[in-house]
Image (cartoon, rainbow, N blue to C red):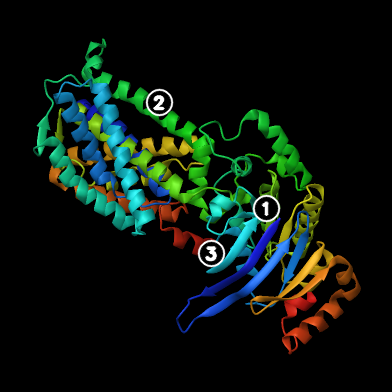
Amino acid sequence: MLEAQNIRVTFNPGTPLENRALKGLSLKIDEGEFVTVIGTNGAGKSTLLGAFSGDIRPERGAIRIDRTDVTRQSAPRRASRLGRVFQDPRMGTCETLTILENLAIAAARTRRRRLGPGAPRAKVEGWRARLAELGLGLENRLDDKVGLLSGGQRQALSLLMACLVPNRALLLDEHTAALDPGAADTVLRLTDQFAERDRLTVLMVTHSMAQALRHGTRTIMLHEGQIVVDLSAAERAELGVPGLLDLFQQVRGQPVDDDAMVLS
Amino acid sequence: MSLFAFMGALEAGLIFGLVAIGVFLSFRVLDFPDLTVDGSFPLGAAVAAVGILSGMNPFLATALAACAGFAAGYVTAQLHLRLNILHLLASILVMLALYSVNLRIMGRPNLPLLNSETVFTPVEALPLPHMYAMPLVLAFAIFAAKLLIDWFLSTEIGLALRAAGASPRMAAAQGIDRNHVLPLGLGLSNALVALAGALFAQAQGFADVTMGVGVIIIGLAAVIVGETILPARTMFLATLAAVAGSLAYRVTIAFALNLDAIGLRAQDLNLVTAVLVVAAIAAARSRGLPGRPKLKRRETTNA
């Protein structure tokens, strides 16, 4: 379970560049819920995700994971409960290490690292099987440097690394925005597959309305640092993209001019 | 060049192989330009010399020297992490402070070890001339140290260290805290350098407070020369390249200074070193290998 309680984030406070990114936002995501987040640039989507992951510390309010207050915990400490995938495929994996070594690092995420072998033989077959689930043939390339993989392959590996050990929640930051359409579909399909099988609690930020409606069980819309629309699965199904667009324009009081959000 | 000079160059090259592995750890693995080594090399020499002269077992004194080096690297890392001091500046500050610390440890600028028992005393018992025995014994010792570092870098903690240096955001998302791994990595790097300082003092028969000048450049030269002659795909080859680079550097220098035709003298050593480093970087650049600034590399690959 993820919970943000009345959080406020201001960038560059007290300067001419002051930007109130989140204005007392509250959000509760129940166990097993898959929430998609949409909003225009600057609405606060990434800031919300950063507040959950620990990259951004809110000046007011509290962040809880499973009722534990983690507001003051650093990002590496929260990583024992949270899996993350970034927008840039190069961010989620280490290109100078091999696929096997990347998986070894991901396998130790939730516990203290030891002076034992990073990739013990007994574990490798299990990891190979998980790689095979991606359907990209990576299970035969364990000793290849990750820098040799394509963007889509790296992002699929990032997703697997985020889900390799059990998570309390998964945070996805526009994780298909930098991929070509084919690779984006693959990664989204894998996301749904992992989320369903492990009954993951997911927070997925996306730039595309269609994607937001097609995936997950609930959709929220951010505008100027607040949640303006919160739709359950049933409500979403009724609405469709045109309905959502109308709703969005009503809330904003002006037409949406962000092509990517409408068309993709 | 005489055979004696060549063997001497091999001996120094092997000992500085440890410096090269240390510099490889900080500059390449952790992506942290650490100049502390100019202070931790004589620190290792000083601690070992004082320990030996006070009657300590030479192996214990050498181990103590490595611990002192670890502490120096640890302090540099903490200055950078806790006080947010720029990495280069933090390491220069520690290097500066260590000059005084080393003088305090030794009590005077130079300590001779000529008639003392050292870690190399058992080498005299080998049925081989000293000239050949030293490089042979050192080769085994340095190779063992290299294998130990290779093993460490393949453990869970070692992999965390490599990830934190190469992709900090991925490391943070995987629960790797830079505040924990950086002090460990820099400590280890400087422990190797101090160990080299301790061995060098015992091989040469003295510890001198100025013996650290330019050690960082020699180490970096070894790493860059090594990458040029042996482009590494695995960690085993990367650390081997560092040692090979150190050997190549020493032999080249000895050759240049001994060649009467060129007319170089001992006082030209630092100039020759600088020219060699520049030449190695230029060679690496033309072959598209590391050794040039990272930003440049990204620019060209994206173009």
Residue at the spot x=25%, y=39% of the render? B41
Name which of mark 1 and mark 3 comes first in the sequence: 3
Q: Which of the 4 quarters of the picture holds residue A65?
A: bottom right
Q: Which residue is mark 1?
A: A66
Whether A234 is drawn above or below B261: the answer is below
Residue at mark 2: chain = B
**Element at label 1:** loop
Q: Which residue is mark 3?
A: A57
Q: Which mark is residue B144?
A: 2
The single residue placed furthest to the bottom in the displayed view is A254
Q: Which is more toward the observer, A14 or B117? A: A14
Seen in the image, is B139 located left or right of residue A13?
A: left
Instruction: Name the amino acid type tagged 1.
Output: Asp
On the question of residue B108 being in view, the answer is yes
Question: What percent of the width, then of the height, locates residue B26?
Answer: 39, 46
Q: Which mark is residue B256?
A: none
Question: What percent of the width, then of the height, locates residue A140?
Answer: 71, 39
**Element at label 2:** helix
Question: What percent of the width, then of the height, locates residue B38?
Answer: 25, 45
Residue at the spot x=62%, y=50% of the render? A148
Instruction: Name the amino acid type tagged 3.
Output: Arg
Q: CA distance from mark 2 to mark 3?
A: 46 Å
Give the crowd class for mark 2: few <14, some 14-19, many >=20 residues within 10 Å.
Answer: few
Instruction: Name the amino acid type tagged 2.
Output: Ala
Residue at mark 3: chain = A
> Which mark lies nearer to you, 2 or 3?
3
Whether B83 is drawn above or below B6: the answer is below
Seen in the image, is A238 located left or right of residue B103?
A: right
**Element at label 3:** loop
Q: CA distance from mark 1 to mark 3?
A: 18 Å
